[in-house]
Structures are given as C-alpha cells and as structure tokens.
Image: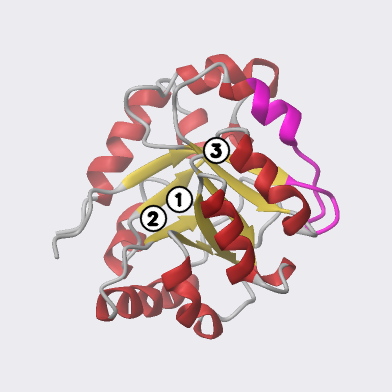
Amino acid sequence: MSAPPPVVAPSILAADFSRLAEEARAVEGVADWLHIDVMDNHFVPNLTIGLPVVTSLRAATDLPFDVHLMIDDPRRWAPGYADAGAYNVTFHAEASDNPVSLAKDLRAAGAKAGLAIDRDTPVEPYLELLPHFDTLLIMTIKAGFGGQKFIPAMLDKVAAARRHVDAGHLEVRIEVDGGIADDTIAQAAEAGADAFVAGTAVYSAADPAEAVRHLKALARRP
C-alpha cells in the first residue's frame, strides 16, 4: 500500500483571533485541513474558543475542520462539533472513559473520529483501539499552549503507531501536533507521521500559504 500524501493543517491557535475568517482564507487552496484547538481551562490550563465560534467560522471557509478537543467530558461536547460540520473531531484518551463508544457516535454524526495522546501518556495501551478511529494524534509537546518546543522523544510513539498501523493495514492518519516547523517536520515524517499541525510556522510567516507549501514539500515521505 503506497503512503498517502502528507496532510498539513495550519493551527488557528497561532492566528490573529480578531480576524479568524481572513486567517483561514489565507491558507485556502493549499492547506489540507484547518486545525482548531478547543481548550476549556480544565483539562488544560488554557481557554480558547468553543462551538459558537467554530460554527461561525464554518460559514467563512471551505477548508475541512480538524477539531482538537482538549476538554473534560468530551462525550458531552464532541458530537456538537460533528453536527457543526467538522471533518475530523479528535478528543483526548486521558479525558474519555469509553473512547470507542464516542468514536462510533462521531462517525454516526458524519465526522471522522480522532484519538489524541498527550505527552506523558504511553501510546501502547491504545493501539488496539485504532480500527475504530480515523486519526491518532500524538502530542509532540504538552497539550495546552502553542509555541512550545518540539520534543524529539515523542517520535518513539509515532514510530510505534506507524508499525502497528502498517502491520494491521489500517487506514488511520498519524498526526503530530506541537513544534512542527521546517526544522522538525521531516523528522516526524520519517518516524511515520502523515498529518502535521503547524501553528507558528504558518501564521508567523510573511506568506502563510507559501509556508504551508514548503512544509508539505519537507513532509513527503521517501
């Protein structure tokens, strides 16, 4: 099975929140997904945006939404993001007592289902759940804040997940989030990631669209 082309998902966490619609449109036509971090100041010590903002933004761009829920009680809130038109809704394993059941609910609501693993969480206990998911998001920082430095040791998790996905011939994207830039994306791709969240590397660039193109070129697995 040939490797799918890499996905680059600019993170609006690094965008100008006063002009989110314009920031989203700045990467239309080149970004694959738009990554949206939802934080509740409980699961992580930061507060960002919620469902009303995501719903409003959905009307402003055609980009597929890759919603990353860093929240407590994802069962209560996750289906609402699927109903709002998110392409992929990812919730944290650490916040869910029944990940498979919630994944089924998200798929039934018309979204892809993603499972996120934070920095200090081993990936191995969750590998057997992957047939129920479309995306495995491995944090390459500690969840909660943008602009953190990439942690190379997290690539061991990526490699373990890639071996499991390939051995089982699973159609699961392995996504990395945290410190992804032009000096780290190739390492993540070599370890087995095929979806890449990039915040500062995109939205701090003079030309965000060109930054996405450059990251895509660097992420192509040989």
Residue 205: image location, x then y, percent = 45, 27
The residue that disc 1 covers is 180
Could you tell whether 216 is left or right of 199 in the image? left
Write down the quadrant of residue 94 in the picture. bottom right
Q: Residue at x 75, y 48 (%)?
A: 77
Q: Which residues are magenta?
A: 39-56
Spatial CA span between label 1 and label 2: 6 Å
Q: Residue at x 75, y 36 (%)?
A: 50
Furthest residue to the bottom?
Answer: 125
Whether residues under marks 1 and 2 lie with C-beta atoms below 8 angstroms apart, the answer is yes
Q: Amino acid at mark 3?
A: Ala
State which mark lies toward you, 2 or 3: 3
The residue that disc 3 covers is 86
At label 1, counting other C-alpha atoms closer than 10 Å, the crowd grade (few under 14, some 14-19, many 20 or more) is many
The local secondary structure at tag 1 comes to: loop
**As displayed, is residue 205 above or below residue 82?**
above
